[in-house]
Image: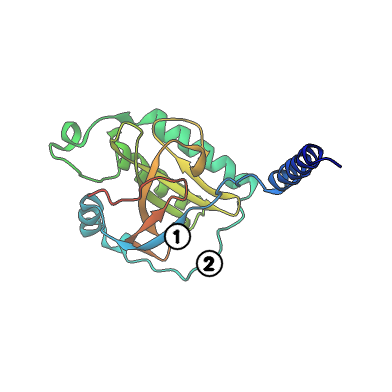
Amino acid sequence: MTFAVKVRFLAVILGVTLASATSAIPAPKTLASMVTGSVTSQPIGHYEFCQRYADECNIKSRPAPAPKVTEYGWTAIHDINSSVNNRIMARTDMQVYGREEYWEYPVDAGDCEDYALQKRKELSERGFALSDLLITVVRKPDGEGHAVLTVRTSKGDFILDNLTSQVKLWSDTDYTFLKRQASFDTGRWVTIEDGRDVVVGALR
C-alpha cells in the first residue's frame, strides 16, 4: 500500500470513528425542574406582604419530591391561570395603590405579582400545597423584571403567567430565572441556577 493510499485509508477510518462518536453523544435534555441554590434576599414587596399576612409567611415544610398532579389538578391549573388573567385588569402598583412594589391580593386590578398571589391562593384552596406554589422573579428578554407563579410537579416546574394563557414548562419560556420562594419556607427565597447558560442574579 502506497503512502498516499495509507493516508486516505486512515482518513476514512478516522472520519467513521468521529461520526460514530458524535452520534453516540445524546442531545441535551430539557431541564424539567429548576435547580435552586442558596437562600437569597426577599423582594421588598414580599417582605411587606409578610408583615400584613404573617401567618402565610411562616409555613415550613420538609423537603419532598414534587407531587404527581391528577387530571383534576391539571384542569385546576389551566382554569385558574385563565380565569385570573381574564378577570383582573393589568395595572401598575402606582395606578392601583399609589406606590411602587406593593404586593397584594387583587380585587379587580393589579400587576404581575398580584396575579401570582391570587393564583397561588386559589390553587391552595383547590388542595395544592403552598410548598409547591412558588412566586418566582424573572427577567424578561427586554431586561424588565417580572413575577410569575411556579407550580412544582413530578413532570417539572410549570409557569403561570399573566402575560399568556398558556401554562408552560419553565425551560420553554424565554425568561431569565432569578429567584423564587423556598419550597421549605414560605417566607424565604432561594436563587435559581438556571442551567441554560444565562446569568443568575438577584432582583432587588
The quadrant in which residue 76 appears is: top right
Instruction: Tell me the kind of residue under disc 1.
Output: Ser
Task: Give the x, y percent position of residue 30.
Answer: 58, 45
**Of marks 2 and 1, which one's residue comes earlier in the chain?**
2
Task: Give the x, y percent position of residue 166.
Answer: 51, 32
Q: Quadrant of the N terminus?
A: top right
From the viewer's perspective, is residue 142 above or below residue 156? above
Q: Give yes or no for contact between labels 2 and 1 (Cβ–Cβ under 8 Å).
A: yes
Task: Give the x, y percent position of residue 71.
Answer: 64, 45
Q: Secondary structure at mark 2?
A: loop
Identify the residue shown where x is 40% and y is 61%. Answer: 37
The quadrant in which residue 38 appears is: bottom left
Identify the residue shown where x is 25% and y is 30%. Answer: 91
- Whether residue 169 is visible, yes or no, is no
Give the labeled residue for mark 1: 131
Instruction: Tell me the kind of residue under disc 2.
Output: Ala
Give the labeled residue for mark 2: 64
- Whether residue 73 is visible, yes or no, is yes
Identify the residue shown where x is 60% and y is 46%. Answer: 28
From the viewer's perspective, is residue 74 above or below residue 95? below
Q: Residues within 10 Å of mark 1 (few under 14, many from 20)?
A: many
From the viewer's perspective, is residue 131 above or below residue 88? below
Colour mapping used in the image: rainbow
Return the residue nearer the eye: 148 or 176: 176
Return the residue nearer the eye: 80 or 35: 35
Task: Give the x, y percent position of residue 148.
Answer: 38, 42
